[in-house]
Amino acid sequence: MSAAILILGFLVLLLVGVPVFIAMAGASLLYVAFAESGPLLVVVHRMIAGIDSFPLLAIPFFIMAGSIMNSAGITHRIYDFALALVGWLRGGLGHVNVVGSVIFAGMSGTAVADAGGLGNIEIKAMRDHGYDVEFAVGLTGASATIGPIIPPSLPMVIYGVAANASIGKLFAAGLVPGLLMAGTLMIMVAYYAHKRKFGRDLAFRWGVFGFALVEIAALAFTIVAADLLYEHLSRWVAFLVVVGIALALNFALKLKAYMALMTPVILIGGMASGAFTPTEAAVAATAYALFLGFFIYRTLTLKSFVRVSMETVETTSIILFIVGGAAIFGYLITTTQVTDHVASLVLSITDNPLLILLLVNVFLLIVGCFMETIAAITILVPVLLPLMTKIGVDPVHFGLIMVLNLMIGLLTPPVGLVLYILARISGISFERATRACLPFLIPLLVTLAAVTYWPGMVLWLPKMLYP
């Protein structure tokens, strides 16, 4: 009965339009006051304890890094690089859309930053080249969901804190599924290019394509040089030498995207080598974005930096309110044994792990339609994770399943945040944006099935990097 007060209080508050974090904290307050008759300060204490977590420091820095890259025009350089690399293919701008999102995913870790920054460039370019606006919007929305799968990832940080799982392993686990998402989307683009007889948006020129290959070669050379230097020199000396090599290559060859492409290399390489933790990687991403914006490209102004900083404070505050509300709500969900009841209920229906995973996927897809990603993770991890561990699912594997489900939810009404962003930047209605994204759910669902039922694909890289 006491658990019913907590759950019903939360649902009633949601239905009357109360914000999610207030609904969670309010329902918890009602439960403590009337069901437990305990001190109300326990709610405040648990909320503070929920946000007093070192890994959560990554949140403002990843948000700021993505915003700086959009504000400083770094996304334009990424787009131009992707255009030179694959723009000459049939349906080229569609492939550019996906490749650009993969690169940007290694920098920002959020779907919203991808859709709002890179998506604005991509949709305009595709419309100017005669693509249907629905095709451009649908593909942009689907490719934006790659952002939180390929490391670094803001939702993975939230899941890691809620599940007490290794954020480094979660980041590593997302790389292969993220590339699989990109591959299935590019197959979808190729299918549409054949069906609708799309032409080539750019004529193939060895000069343009070759320059993109030069940037890749410079990137590969820097990675190999860094690996060799770190074996024979101290960390700081090797770091300074690598920085010197990177700057020399950039200015000598007059490369346009090379320094921006170094961002995911620095982040992933730094985490894999142990130079910094996933939390510290967020600080490194922000520092590097500031370095590019102020000193290399000189496109970031003090005024735009202040604006980005204020937007970061606002967004971070909202997320931390949600995390704080979910901390007390999740604690009470556990103490009232709701998690045990949920596990017993599901296991009474079936004890087949494959069917249970299917039921959980369907449930998460439905939740993604109605609940914001951060709130869904913080509320549902305490409920679903015990069930997953009972059937032998690794917490890191489940993290990928949950985040991918909720990323698909960003493209489904009524709460699909990416849909609202796409509707605004493309100038079409929310309903048209929703219909445009529907066909592109197919490759995302195919990837979800592979992630769910092929754990070896997800866990291979984490086991290799974190034995």
Image: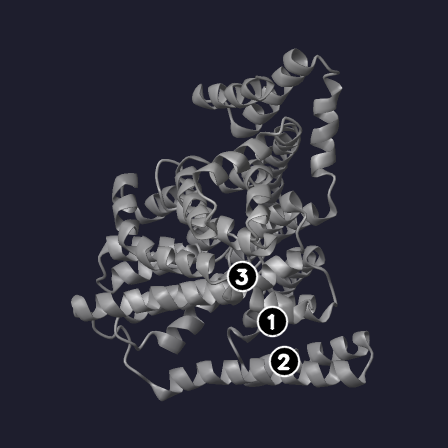
Residue that lies at the very extreme toward the right in this rendered image: 234
First of labels 3, 2 by sequence position: 3
Residue drawn 47% across the image and 37% down it:
348
Q: Residues within 10 Å of mark 2 (few under 14, many from 20)?
A: some
Q: Residues within 10 Å of mark 1 (few under 14, many from 20)?
A: some
Q: Secondary structure at mark 3?
A: helix
In which image quadrant can residue 314 be found? top right
Image coords of residue 463 (percent x, y) = 63, 67
Residue 344 lies, with reference to residue 278, above or below; the image says above
Image coords of residue 421 (percent x, y) = 39, 45
Residue to which mark 2 is pinned: 223
Residue closest to the eye, 336 or 128: 336
**Relative side of 395 to 85, left or right:** right
- Amino acid type, mark 3: Gly
**Relative side of 317 to 105, left or right:** right
CB contact under 8 Å: marks 2 and 1: yes
Residue drawn 67% across the image and 13% down it:
33
The mark found on residue 136 in the picture is: none
Residue to which mark 1 is pinned: 265
Residue 214 seen in the figure: yes
Residue 311 seen in the figure: no
First of labels 3, 1 by sequence position: 3
The mark found on residue 174 in the picture is: 3
Q: Residues within 10 Å of mark 3 (few under 14, many from 20)?
A: many
